[in-house]
Amino acid sequence: MARAQIRLDLNAGAINRLGLVEARRRVADMTRATFNRANVLTPVDTGRLRVGNNMRVYTAGLIAYGEVFNQVEYAAAVHNGARPRKIVPRTKKALKFTVNGQTIFAKSVNWPGMRPQPWLTKAMVETAPRYGFTVINL
């Protein structure tokens, strides 16, 4: 009885390249969707925070990475919240501000802080399952 025999040689480099291309495509799709959702969820006062949203997709070795971030100087305080604190002048003797048309001087003021508004985290958590990803650590 004759036996059929097949030999299969696998090129590991080619397999890794194909896998990396597919991984990068999937990561790019999810990153783009997260970026779009983050733009919808970004708190808006002047619009500067929304314009500051950014994304990038890159590979390093055999790993594909996607990032959605915001580098506006107050983005972290809005996203993570800020604790209440006492504000005192740095160089002058008093703080000066206007309330209802009246100029007020104060040696210090108590700022109440702000609650967190984690729009980037929320966008990622909402988007990940649709693309087959699971968020493990927040």
Image: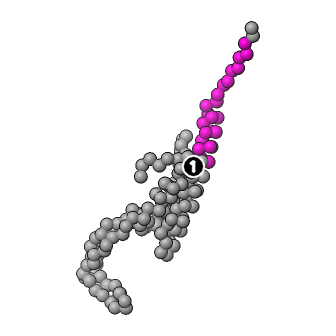
Question: Closest to the observer: 118 or 95?
Answer: 118
Badge 1 density bin: few <14, some 14–19, many ≥20, Cα 10 Å: few
Horizontal and vertical percent for residue 125?
49, 54
Identify the amino acid type marked 1.
Answer: Tyr
**Residue at position x 57%, y 49% from top?**
131
Location of residue 34 (image quadrant)? bottom right
Residue hosting label 1 = 131
Residue 83 visible to the viewer: yes
**Residue at position x 58%, y 57% from top?**
33
The correct choice, above or below, for 99 with respect to 10 in the image is below
Question: Closest to the observer: 108 or 34?
Answer: 34
**Residue at position x 49%, y 66% from top?**
42
Q: Specify whether 47 is left or right of 17.
A: left
Q: Secondary structure at mark 1?
A: helix
Horizontal and vertical percent for residue 2?
75, 10
The correct choice, above or below, for 76 with respect to 45 in the image is above
The N terminus lies in which quarter of the figure?
top right
Residue 58 visible to the viewer: no
Q: Main secondary structure of the magenta part?
A: helix
| Residue that extends furthest to the bottom in the rendered view of this protein | 101
| Residue that extends furthest to the top in the rendered view of this protein | 1
Horizontal and vertical percent for residue 64?
55, 46
The stretch in magenta equals 3-25
Q: Is residue 23 magenta?
A: yes
Question: Closest to the observer: 136 or 91?
Answer: 136
Q: Specify whether 35 is left or right of 90.
A: right
